[in-house]
Image (cartoon, helix red, strand yellow):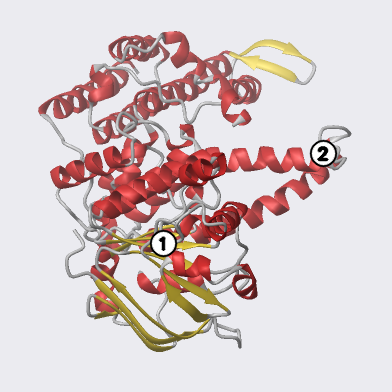
């Protein structure tokens, strides 16, 4: 699915019109095929701006952003780039276009001008992956928040992109909705899809392959989630990141020799260690 | 979702009927023909024909007649006013006189004709919206107006606007409900006093609503762009419309009826 997908940002600098400060300041980043990378940073750190560069919704003021070798500043490459990188945004209510579930899932493929039977098979597949089979003809307003966001993911999947960017896609959902989306994302990554997850919640990066920390428009740090947690709460706090109680507990247990710090934290193991 | 409990979107009644299965373009064109027919026919003796047709189509569409008649409820007041104006203001043989008010025979005929025309107009249009979902309607209109696109008529854009409006009506009603509750919680008095006072009390609801609408529009535009939307050019459809033989037959029958009605009208008068 993700064969050969690669996105490269070199010295990307970006300022929004009529502002002096740079939202991104010299970002170098490479996103490789099949990996699950988290862009972590506090509000206003520039992580959403960076995400929008991957889909060519924004083009760098300086530097280059290449998606599979295509420059995002090239107007002619836009269509191809948007088929390679699909995006899911924060508020499900603001990204669903059609009033009926299957019509919304079909919006992307329709834009690509695909034949009806191809659209039909893609929509059926995307809805089944996102657990929405049987709801094809339901009006969108009857769905729950989690279901709406899963529909937004289905709409992105129907484009059959090798890379999916989730721009704080779980931020407005309740815990159950969040779990639903993360399960779908883990499944997709298992099938080989490249996932770029933008978040400010440390507990969401546990399952990622790699974490990139952004603060003030600058890429501060890159590494595995375990290395990130090992940095300690004080350093993370200087980047505006708060270490959640669960991770702190896990660190304490690792420090006491009850858990192996080389194994990613999972609720079950933490609970077992506590019981011991 | 409280608002949604009290209203239905449009007045589409899903059912598995011959009329429901017709291509929306056929239904739109047939309705236009019927509306023209209602205005072409002037002789009152022919109006029972329209009533008969209405009953027949409702039965064919498996929609209770009471439901069809209910679709005319919002215009009853308008129909009455129109009738009254024509009853009192048409000149001719006086039937009855009281002070400055005169009713003439011509006035009664004219009033009945105008009232019935208006009524059938709304009832036939109602049949269209009862049997065609808003999505099908917007699809049908887009395809019907597509030939005008080279002349600069924004057929696709209008249909897309209609689709988005349909999608966002429940969301915005929900939003309005939320803002109203927030204002009520802070002591706003939304439903007391005269009309001016009430309208003024509504301003604090409208202002945040407008801000939210613009924010949503901006977000939606970004999301649509991210999903590869570039306007109507080169777009395909998940459920393309198919014009079948039955559509041609249904439309031809309606047009034939209208022509027959107009001819009979000319012959009678």
| Towards the viewer: B116 or B225 | B225
Chain at tag 1? A
Outermost left residue:
B245
- Tell me if mark 1 has few (under 14), some (14-19) or many (20+) residues whose alpha carbon lies within 10 angstroms of its own: few
| Residue at 50% over, 73% down | A213
The reply to the same-chain question for discs 1 and 2 is no
Label 1 vs label 2, nearer the camera: 1
**Residue B4: x and y, percent?**
57, 29
| Towards the viewer: B108 or A132 | A132
The disc placed on residue A262 is 1
Count numbered badges in the picture.
2
* Residue B258 figure quarter: top left
Q: Quadrant of the N terminus of chain A?
A: bottom left
**Residue A153: x and y, percent?**
36, 49
Element assignment for label 2: helix
**Residue A44: x and y, percent?**
59, 71
> Would you say residue B165 is visible in this rendering?
no
| Towards the viewer: A207 or A136 | A207
Q: Which residue is mark 2?
A: B185
Chain at tag 2? B
| Towards the viewer: A35 or B34 | A35
* Residue A18 figure quarter: bottom right
Q: What distance separates the C-alpha of mark 1 from that of mark 2? A: 52 Å
| Residue at 48% over, 53% down | A259
């Amino acid at each position: 699915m993700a064969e050969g997908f690669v996105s490269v940002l070199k010295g990307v600098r970006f300022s929004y019109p009529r502002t002096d400060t740079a939202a991104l300041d010299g970002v170098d980043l490479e996103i490789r095929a099949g990996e699950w990378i988290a862009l972590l940073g506090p509000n206003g750190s520039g992580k959403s701006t960076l995400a929008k560069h991957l889909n060519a919704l924004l083009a760098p003021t300086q530097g280059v952003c290449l998606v599979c070798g295509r420059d995002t500043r090239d107007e002619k490459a836009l269509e191809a780039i948007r088929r390679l990188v699909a995006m899911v945004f924060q508020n499900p209510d603001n990204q669903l276009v059609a009033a009926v579930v299957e019509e919304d899932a079909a919006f992307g493929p329709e834009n690509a001008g695909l034949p009806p039977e191809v659209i039909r098979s893609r929509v059926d597949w995307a809805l089944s992956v996102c657990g929405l089979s049987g709801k094809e003809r339901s009006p969108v307003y009857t769905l729950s928040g989690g279901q709406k966001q899963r529909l937004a993911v289905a709409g992105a999947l129907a484009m059959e992109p090798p890379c999916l960017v989730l721009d704080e896609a779980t931020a407005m959902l309740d815990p159950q909705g969040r779990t639903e989306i993360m399960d779908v994302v883990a499944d997709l990554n298992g099938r080989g899809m490249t996932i770029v997850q933008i978040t400010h919640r440390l507990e969401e990066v546990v399952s990622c392959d790699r974490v990139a920390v952004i603060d003030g428009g600058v890429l501060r740090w890159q590494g595995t989630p375990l290395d990130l947690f090992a940095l300690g709460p004080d350093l993370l706090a200087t980047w505006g990141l708060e270490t959640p109680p669960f991770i702190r507990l896990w660190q304490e247990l690792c420090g006491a020799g009850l858990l192996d710090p080389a194994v990613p934290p999972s609720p079950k193991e933490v609970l077992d260690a506590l019981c011991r | 979702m409280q608002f949604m409990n009290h209203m239905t979107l449009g007045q589409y009644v899903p059912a598995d009927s011959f009329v429901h299965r017709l291509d929306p373009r056929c239904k739109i064109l047939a309705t236009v023909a019927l509306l023209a027919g209602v205005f072409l026919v002037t002789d009152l003796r022919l109006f029972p024909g329209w009533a008969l047709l209405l009953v027949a189509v409702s039965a064919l569409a498996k929609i209770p007649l009471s439901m069809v008649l209910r679709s005319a409820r919002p215009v009853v007041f308008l129909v009455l006013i129109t009738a009254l104006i024509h009853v009192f203001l048409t000149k001719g043989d006086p039937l009855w006189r009281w002070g400055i008010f005169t009713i003439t025979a011509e006035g009664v005929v004219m009033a009945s004709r105008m009232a019935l025309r208006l009524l059938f107009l709304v009832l036939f249009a109602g049949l269209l919206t009862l049997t065609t979902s808003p999505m099908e309607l917007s699809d049908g209109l887009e395809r019907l107006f597509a030939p005008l696109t080279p002349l600069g008529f924004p057929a696709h854009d209008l249909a897309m606007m209609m689709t988005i409006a349909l999608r966002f009506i429940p969301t915005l009603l929900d939003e309005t409900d939320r803002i109203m509750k927030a204002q009520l919680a802070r002591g706003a008095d939304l439903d007391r006093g005269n009309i001016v006072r009430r309208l003024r009390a509504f301003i604090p609801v409208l202002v945040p609503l407008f801000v939210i609408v613009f924010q949503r529009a901006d977000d939606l535009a970004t999301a649509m762009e991210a999903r590869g939307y570039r306007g109507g050019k080169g777009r395909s459809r998940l459920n393309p419309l198919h014009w079948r033989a039955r559509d041609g037959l249904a439309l031809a029958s309606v047009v034939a009826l209208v022509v027959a009605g107009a001819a009979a009208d000319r012959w009678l008068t």
